[in-house]
Image (tube, helix red, strand yellow):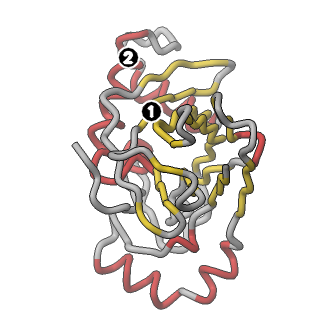
Amino acid sequence: MAFKKTKIFASSIALLLGSTILPNAHPHVFVEANMELVINDKNQFTELRHVWRFDELFSSTMIIDFDTNADGELDEKEMAEITKTIHSSIGEYDFYTALRAGTKVINFYEPEKLNAYMENGQMIMFFSVEPENPHDFSTAPLRISASDTSYYVAFEFTEKNIILKENAESCKTKVTVPNYDELYASNSDTLSEAFFSNPENPELGDEFFSWAEITC
């Protein structure tokens, strides 16, 4: 399955939390996003591996909601139910993932499976996506993002969270983070219109994403 359009997903995790999202919401879920890029020997990007660490409050909510045997922990079966629920919910919304060749959208295939486990009271979820076609760095920089532009879920990453696997000795990474206060203040009418026309999927621009730009 290929994704033909980058969409903004803000409903699945909120659904798990039983919350309502507003277009000017402050973040309620915090995720440390680690992203590992696979680059082949032809200087082409071929795979993005996500490793997301959720905050302790959200993680504890998952235990409350999915601990069916009430033992205070999430076993393998219960964790599989969480990842199944999240996978089915976010499939339409590009898994909070955006890929660009410069400004051009890079389509990618749906991950077959999400995996997760608990570590020190925090849920770690990991999965990978592959572009429909390998991206050649000689044509344009690669830009990647894990973002929720409703700002209900805050994905946080810096250069240290971007890992380049092999064949990347000459590559450089730069992360840019938008000023959300300014963006929401200057786009309040647009945000309101987008939200009320389709509250589960407001169409907002790339300027609302945090981006890691990789040049090789």
Q: Is residue 53 above or below residue 95?
A: above
Amino acid bearing label 1: Ser
Q: Which residue is mark 2?
A: 78
Left or right of 67? Residue 178 is right
Q: Is residue 190 left or right of residue 199?
A: right
Vertical relation: 60 (above or below) 71: below
Q: Position of residue 208 (x, y in %)?
A: 57, 70
Between residue 166 and residue 108, name the one nearer to us: 166
The quarter of the displayed image where residue 168 is located: top right
Q: Residue at x 31, y 62 (%)?
A: 5
Q: Could you tell me which residue is drawn at 56 percent across and 36 percent down? A: 39
- Give SS at disc 2: helix
Figure check: 3 above or below 201:
above
Dot 2 amino acid type:
Glu
User: What is the crowding at mark 1: few (fewer than 14 residues within 10 Å), some, or many (at least 20)?
Assistant: some
Residue drawn 48% across and 75% down?
205
Is any atom of residue 50 visible in this view?
no
Q: How many marks?
A: 2
Quarter of the N terminus within the rendering: top left
Residue 185 visible in image: yes
Q: Residues within 10 Å of mark 2 (few under 14, many from 20)?
A: some
Quarter location, residue 199: bottom left
Please give the residue where the numbered disc 1 appears in the rendered image: 128
Residue 51: x, y in percent?
A: 57, 32
163, 168: nearer the viewer? 168
Question: Where in the figure is residue 95, as x and y percent of width and height?
Answer: 40, 46
**Which label belongs to residue 173?**
none
For the residue labelled by badge 1, is the local secondary structure a helix, a strand or a loop?
strand
Mark 2 to mark 1 CA distance (whole Å): 21 Å
